[in-house]
Every structure is written in structure tokens, then in C-alpha cells.
Amino acid sequence: MRKSSNQKQPTASSHVEENEEIDWEMRPGGMLVQKRDDVVVDDGASAPAAESIGGPTIKVTVCHGPAHHVLHVPAHSTFGDIKNAVVQKTGLEAKDQRLLFRGKEKEDEEHLHIAGVKDRSKILLLENPASKERKLEEIRKNNEISKACEAVAGVRAEVDKLSERVAALEGAVNGGTKVEEKEFVVLTELLMRQLLKLDGIEAEGEAKMQRKAEELYRPIQSSSPG
């Protein structure tokens, strides 16, 4: 005799009931996947959370100096996610940021909900001291390069003037005009002074290249024609 089975087979409706709280989205190619929560910045742009685990979305404010950046993030986001979300807003790379909550600096892997961050909480953002020093050093170098470029340009202008005088004397000599030797001596001394100025210019980067080009360019007349 054939036994009847009383075991209840799973139905499509039961699967729906189990997954009714899950949001799904269609990916390119027709694949159906669970929808992923995003970190939403106040201007409407969104940045995917590094380790989104779902959960409710909370509103947090990141205070950076006088600026306040409002984010809507999953409660289970990490402080590293917050850093990545405000990179464009602050102009600071994630590695150059320090996040403090309730007076304590937080590590990138720490989760907001575990640290006690709730809806409408505020997080303080500070720039890493090493980043500040690096920027100040870049500004200093740029200023030095600018000054060196100006100095090289000044020497170049003086050398050009002296070169014109040398060319005029050579033209006179070639035309049969007698030129006193002291004229060439004076020009040579003036050229040497400019070269000493050029050698004394401390240059880096672009300014160093300009100085080297000027050294190759310099038309030194060390002796008068016979």
C-alpha cells in the first residue's frame, strides 16, 4: 500500500514571507541580488560603505572647523566609511583625517553603533598633524622655487643686455673700428658678476633647470679680439 506523506513541501509564498524584509535589486545581466546600503552625503551624492551590514540609517554630522557635513549612513558603518564619504567635501584624504567621538579618537575599523554613535550624533574631524607639516613644507618649497625663478630671470635679463653690448663691440671691430681693450675688460667683469649671482641662487625643481639652462646659455667673452 502506498503511504501518503504528511510532510509539508515549502511553497513560494513561504519563501516570500521569509524574505519579505529584504530589499532586492536587479544588476546588469539580469542577476537579482540583495540591495546594498550606501553612505549618502548631504549633497545627494552617495559613496558605498566599505562594510555595509544593513540595519537602520542614521543621520550624523561631521564637524570640520567651521564646516558641518551631514551624512546619512547605515548604523553599522565604520569610522573608515565616514572618512571615505567626506574626502571630496574636506579635500583631505582618508589617511590624513582623524575622527573623534566623545573626545576619543576612533580607529577606521571601529563600528559606529558599537562606539555609541546614534541618529543626529556629531563627529569631530581633525587634520593629521603630519599632513599639515607636509602641506607647509610644500608651500615653503614652492615659495623658494618662485623666488629662485625670479632671480634666474633677473640674471638672464642682465646677461642679455651685456650680450648686446658685446655683439655691438664685435661688430665695430669687424668693421675696422678700433675699440679699446678696457671695453672688453669691463664687459667681462660685468658678465662674471652675473655668473656669480647665478651660482649663488639655491634652486630646486623647475628653478634648478632654468639655472642650468642659463649656465649653458651664458656668452662669456674672456678675451678681446687681437
Image: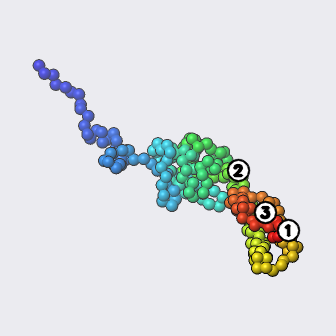
Identify which residue is drawn at 58% across, 43% down.
108
Give the camera-side residue of 226 and 170: 226
Residue annotated with mark 1: 189
Query: Which residue is pictured at 61% across the width and 54% down the height?
Result: 92
Badge 2: residue crowd in 10 Å (few <14, some 14–19, many ≥20): few
Residue 44 image position (x, y, % from top left): 48, 59
What type is the residue that disc 3 sits on? Leu
- Mark 1 or mark 3: which comes first in sequence? 1
Residue position for label 2: 129
Residue linked to disc 3: 198
Residue 206 lies left or right of residue 120; in this view the side is right
Measure the C-alpha gap from mark 3 to mark 2: 37 Å
Label 1 Cα crowd, 10 Å radius (few <14 / some 14-19 / many 20+): some
Which residue is rendered at x = 80% and y = 60% of the image?
Answer: 199
Q: Amino acid at mark 1?
A: Glu
Front residue of 89 and 9: 89
Between the C-alphas of marks 1 and 3, the distance is 14 Å
Residue at 74%, 61% (x, y): give it: 215
The answer to which of marks 1 and 2 sits earlier in the sequence is: 2
Q: Amino acid at mark 2?
A: Pro
